[in-house]
Amino acid sequence: MTIRTDVEDLLRHLAPQVLGALVRRYGQFEACEDAVQEALLDAAVQWPADGVPERPAGWLTTVASRRLADQVRSESARRRREAAVAALETPLEPVVSGPDDLDHAPDRDDTLLLLFLCCHPALSPSSQIALTLRAVGGLSTAQIAAAFLVPEATMSRRILRAKQRIKATDIPFRMPPPDKRDDRLRVVLQVLYLIFNEGYTASSGPELQRAELAHEAIRLTRAVHRLLPDDNEVAGLLALMLLTDARRPARTGPDGALIPFAEQDRGLWDPVSLKEGVELITSTLARGPLGPYQLQAAIAAVHTEAPRLEETDWPQILALYELLSRVSDNPIVALNHAVAIAMAHGPQAGLAMLRTLDSDGRLADHHRLEAVRAHLLEMAGEPGPARESYLLAAHRTTSLPERRYLEGRAAAITKMRDPAGADENRDAAT
């Protein structure tokens, strides 16, 4: 089991390097990506049994190049295209061989280029996520489909459309021009953040968390941080992921039920991730202008410093949210800001801010708006309206653990208001 896991980790690390090498030399992203996936599959079968080759990246590049040659030959035979025949005249060989194998050539790491390609604005957000996990993350289509709870055929079509879009728009495999680089990097970070969020709190399905997606997002963000160590927002995003994911062991009970932040056993938080995240954001904050990921990471760090909820430095958190609201027009951030206001100045102050968000179309029918409202109404001593908001939030969410938690809160309010009636209703229901 350990050998197989080690091989899987190695393959996922090498996948973007090998794909980048092929695309850089031969172009044809779609064909190269398919060839690399086949090489990864061959390695996943052979390496656990035969051992990892001395130069694993060179092995993968050789096998993928052969698969690419097979594809070209097949296309040539079927369509008799001159371009395919011409391609066959140049032997397809490993991009790197011998002692200068890709393992020893970090300057040829094309992970960032691949991320820019997979997160190109010409692609839809869902396509950006799927293609990033496939091409850069090294996940199979089946694994991605399972993570997002969609049929494999659906995910396959999504990935195929993304690759066809890249081909149709002739997106070049090179760094964006300097005047567009920051904007493109923001898209990359947003895609990685979306992948992490889906892993940390699944948008639908029976499980609250999909740890494999959260871990993959952290792994990819580490790769970007390694390539861009001086970028403050890359460091901020990595710190935010580490500090957030550190709470994962305390978020669910033995039965998988959701445990809200206020009730979590902080002793279960991962101290290694917390330490790394705090050190990373502390060093980053001193370097220059603050971006949204840095500020969110700073907020998460303040939470980790409090041994108990009652000892949280809410004024400091509120001040950070004030800064964050100036640089990020994000409705979920605004919801969290309302909670911070309520904790610092009382629930009515938080409810007043929520009323300003009721007209935000981005929050229309979003369960979290009503969930936050229910929580603040309960804090304010208004159980009736709180119960109604809990039930409305439960109706809107597609996450089963969240729905059960919200319905449980509504039921607890009902029982507290009318214990006898609640017992009668429960008896009647059984």
Image (tube, helix red, strand yellow):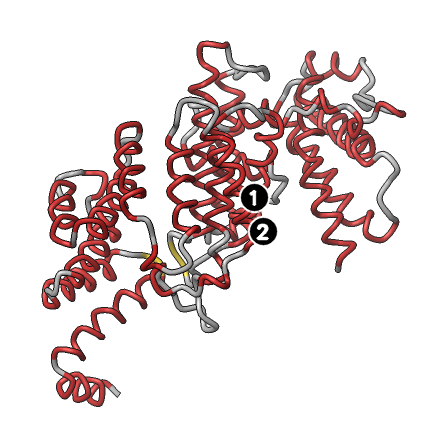
Residue 226 shows which numbered tag?
none
Residue 276 shows which numbered tag?
1
| In the displayed structure image, the side of residue 20 where residue 96 appears, left or right | right
| In the displayed structure image, the side of residue 239 where residue 391 appears, left or right | left
Q: Amino acid at mark 2?
A: Val
Residue 226 or residue 146, whichever sits in front? 226
Q: Position of residue 365 (x, y in %)?
A: 21, 49
Q: Is residue 240 above or below residue 376?
A: above
Q: Amino acid at mark 1?
A: Glu
Which quarter shows the N terminus?
Answer: bottom right
**Residue plotted at (82% across, 48% down):** 46
Q: Secondary structure at mark 1?
A: helix
Residue 395 or residue 214, whichever sits in front? 214
| In the displayed structure image, the side of residue 340 where residue 197 appears, left or right | right
Where residue 328 sits, quadrant-wise, is: top left
Q: Position of residue 44 (x, y in %)?
A: 75, 47
Which quarter shows the C terminus?
Answer: bottom left
Where residue 74 sits, quadrant-wise, is: top right
Residue 63 or residue 187, whichever sits in front? 187
Q: Which residue is mark 2?
A: 272
Q: Position of residue 33 (x, y in %)?
A: 64, 31
Residues tagged 2 and 1 counted as in contact (Cβ below 8 A): yes
**Residue plotted at (82% across, 34% down):** 59
Q: Is residue 211 above or below residue 18?
A: below
Q: Position of residue 239 (x, y in %)?
A: 50, 39
**Residue plotted at (51% across, 48% down):** 214
Q: Secondary structure at mark 2?
A: helix
Within 10 Å of disc 2 (Cα), the crowding (few <14, some 14-19, many 20+) is: few
